[in-house]
Image: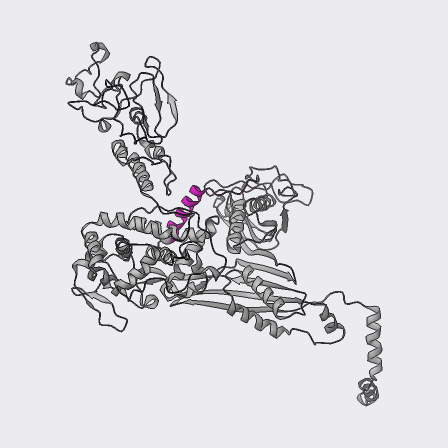
Amino acid sequence: MAWRQALPRLAAATTAPAASLALCEAQRKTDYDLARHQHGKTRVRVLKVRREGGVHAISEYKVETTLFSPAYDRVFTKGDNTDLVATDTQKNTVYIVAKRTDASTPEAFGVALCEHLLKEYPILSGCRADVESVEWARACVDGRNGAQPHVHGFLRSEPERQVASVSMTRGQGPKVESSIEGLVVLKTTQSGFEGYLKDKYTLLPDTQERCMATEMTASWNYAQLPQDFGAARNNVRRQILKGFFGEPATGVYSASLQESIYDAGCLVLDAVPEVKQIEIDTPNLHYLPAKLLDAVGEKFEDDVFIPTSEPSGSINCIVARGAGGRPTTTAPTSGPKLSVETKPVSLNVADAQARAAEEIRGAIITPKANSCPMAVRLAWHASGTFDKNDGSGGSDGATMRFAPEREDGANAGLGIERDILQPVKRAVPEVSTADIWTLAGAQAVEVCGGPRINHAMGRKDATSGAQCPPVGRLPDASQGADHLRDVFYRMGFDDREIVALSGAHTLGRCHKVRSGFDGPWTSNPLKFDGEYFRNLMTKDWVPRDWDGPLQYTDKESHSLTMLPSDLALKEDPAFAVYASKYAADESLFFEDFKKAFEKLISLGTTAAPASTDLDDAAAKVREECMHGSLEHAQTAWRPGVDANSYDAGSRRTALHKAACVPASLFELWSVDIGRQRSVCYTGSGATRTSFLGSSTTSAPPSTRRTRPATPRYMMRRASATPTSCPSCSPAAPRRTRATPPARPREKWPRRTGTRPRSAASSRSRRLPPQAVHVIPCPPSPPTN
């Protein structure tokens, strides 16, 4: 039988001498080289949950590791596994690094993983970690106060992926390449494709109007590693979208997809100086016009399209910096262009703060949720760690992003607000997270009806938890007056400021899952007013009967809450003085809270000082100018006030604020606030100093164009005893109700059919220059 005949051959093969194998091994070493090898672990998935009290945050990564070592040649050529780091070991290392690091970006996680591998295994000459971030967003769920971000609920994001590849050679720093994959974009107009080569195989017609879509992959490397990988990535993404879509209100025409991705690459290099080069790959996704509508009696009007996925174009470009820092290729000339000229990187503080404020307002108040109370609490807690004795802590650094400050029980729940404000950092990457947190608190107070909080920029973000202040510096709501003084005196506050800042409890409510306490302080937790002090001082408070820590409820309705630290303001005699004043006078509370909160959010940084009395006076001048009340603006002015200072929210000076007031207002108002010098303008041709300090010379009455009269509501009634302007001759009249001089009747025609009007009540369209007088100037500052 055939199988019996095969047995001798099989036996010979299984008993082949070892010498033949050795001969084969020697032959392969002589004839062949090991050209390349790779050893690593792929498809390792890890989820990191960060718990801050009852609030959770998550990061999920897909990780692939690759190890390099000259010793690994013999693993392949000799089967010697002596120094081999097993793939199972690499998998477990990913989990260990996830446990030990707080990295929130794939780049930072990859760097931490590579550093760990090289430290643990000296046999390695290098390693690489490819990390993909799986995106999750915090879920918004309906609650007792409307839709709110859930403390531990998340939704999986759409297919866009964040990827990082980190390689490190022993003795050298990491090399990082970042990527965005699966970014699907579509524009419904301002796209065409025409003028291309046509021959007998071409069927595609020219078009100047089409849908243009692509699934984009962008990869870039760094000439210099950024301090914040997340901010750099977000800025790259914004510039790519700007290159594809153009400005939000106007868009940009694209002559081809090739042009759009080149523009996007140039904008990235222009806006992110750390990026060395960027590669953008764009298989175009075709959306074909539904011409079949014409065949069934409907009309195609660029409104119905048929999506297709295959076949697709394969379009790729790499834009890199040349020797002079410019892109190494020339931009195409077809189609309107976005500006890609290289500009020096600078921070326009006023513009950045205004854009950040706008983004913040859109983030903290949405159709689903209002997180203003949490924004105030975040700014408060980020700043309230300051110690005046050694200068540590305070609002600089945004150190709550790191452990151990992030795990401080007093900060429970604030991870939600940090997540809410994270898109602001992406939208305005040039603004520090520390500035965003404090500005969010200031904005939240104002939009909820409280006073306007002045905010100065300039805080810097910390790079690690090494800069975190000691845990335990924040107030403990279960303590009394002595504890409050210990905490606040350490920061440099007095009793009045302690009570004023405690008034922040007029916003928000307690959540048992975060602080252990429960319930609101006021009937409207989203309104900033004086109700907190009115409730505190006028209601009877009794211990609440419940399963939580000691807190108080109002005896009448049992619906409101006060904590032990709140009752201390009522029971301590020194505190009670101010609490009673604030309960009786809401405007006084607003004034004191404004000053104290501005001081609070400036603690720990000299770059963002608290507003001074002069800042407040300048703000008052701007406000009065906005309402056209220049006499009140004079009253608000004091020596040292800078009328050229701008309003942080609107970026407007006093002159901008008064733009809606008739031009004659400034012609008539002669007080030079900016330079503290007053010059009467009586139409004599003398030099007049403008409102903001720029000197101009008026023409004599004979040549100067007569301006319209000042509106009646802006003119002061005549005084029985006019006084003279102190900087002019005694004859210079006080600013009075303008009275037309005696003139021939034909010069002042009376309208037919109307009742005669007296000269004192005349509403003539124009007044002669001689009738224009001045308001008395404020007293000049004392001189030596």
Quarter of the figure with residue 64: bottom right
Q: Is 157 in front, or is 311? A: 157
Q: Is residue 606 left or right of residue 263?
A: left
Q: Is residue 222 left or right of residue 760?
A: right
Where residue 182 sits in the image (x, y, percent)?
55, 56
Label tally: 0
Q: Quadrant of the N terminus?
A: bottom right
Q: Is 734 in front, or is 371? A: 734
Q: Residue furthest front?
A: 784
Q: Is residue 125 left or right of residue 162?
A: right
The magenta segment: 343-363
Where residue 280 sits in the image (x, y, percent)?
60, 51
Where residue 58 sits in the image (x, y, percent)?
46, 65
Q: Quadrant of the C terminus?
A: top left
Main SS, magenta residues: helix
What residue is drawn where x is 82% and y is 71%? 29
Where residue 474 sits in the image (x, y, percent)?
35, 62
Relative to 414, residue 362 above or below: above
